[in-house]
Image (cartoon, rainbow, N blue to C red):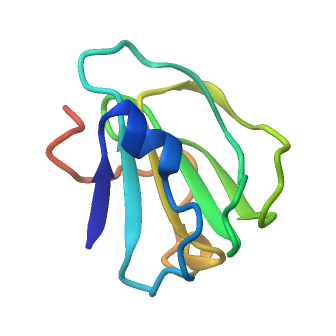
Amino acid sequence: WVEIADDEPERQRGLMFRPPLADDQGMLFQWPGEPPREQSFWMRNTPSSLDILYIDPRGRIVSIASHATPFSETPIPSNGAANGVLELRAGRASEIGAKPGDKVLHPYFKP
């Protein structure tokens, strides 16, 4: 299951101060009503490594930042317009075979 972060306080807090995610957990960041744009995330106050998947409005993965460094304040860019970001446990994206261009199915994304 995924938690949804679809307002500014939830997006700012994200997975800060949280224990590592289980294999079947994630957090989907959404910007309802906003156009896709270059996104940038960091790992401030996030104690476990994550995979960060940037996703376009149609649900296509734009890019994947694997094994993001815990507690790092270095921005991690999407390298393309995105309006969704899925955070998973580090290494999970590779385990499930996710790669740029693949489609993420969720009602937020419109085909």
Res. 51 image quadrant: bottom right
Point out the residue furthest to the top here: 35
Percent of width and height locating residue 66: 71, 63
The picture places residue 83, in percent across and down from the top left corner, at 41, 29
Would you say 2 lies left or right of 40 here?
Answer: left
- Residue farthest to the left? 107
Query: From the image, which quarter does the N terminus lie in?
Result: bottom left
At a point 33% along the width and 15% down the height, the residue shown is: 34
User: For this view, does 5 lie left or right of residue 64?
Assistant: left
Image coordinates for residue 21, horizontal then vertical, percent: 49, 80
Q: Residue sitting at 77 percent across and 67 percent down?
A: 70
Q: Residue at point 78% right, 38% down?
A: 75
Between 107 and 61, the one nearer to me in the picture: 107
Quadrant location of the C terminus? top left
The answer to whether any part of residue 9 appears in the image is yes
Is residue 82 toward the left or the right of residue 63 in the image? left
Q: Is residue 86 above or below residue 76?
A: below
Q: Is residue 6 above or below residue 45?
A: above
Name the one closer to the observer, 65 or 60.
Answer: 65
**Can you name the residue that lies furthest to the bottom here?**
22
Q: Residue at x 38, y 45 (%)?
A: 10
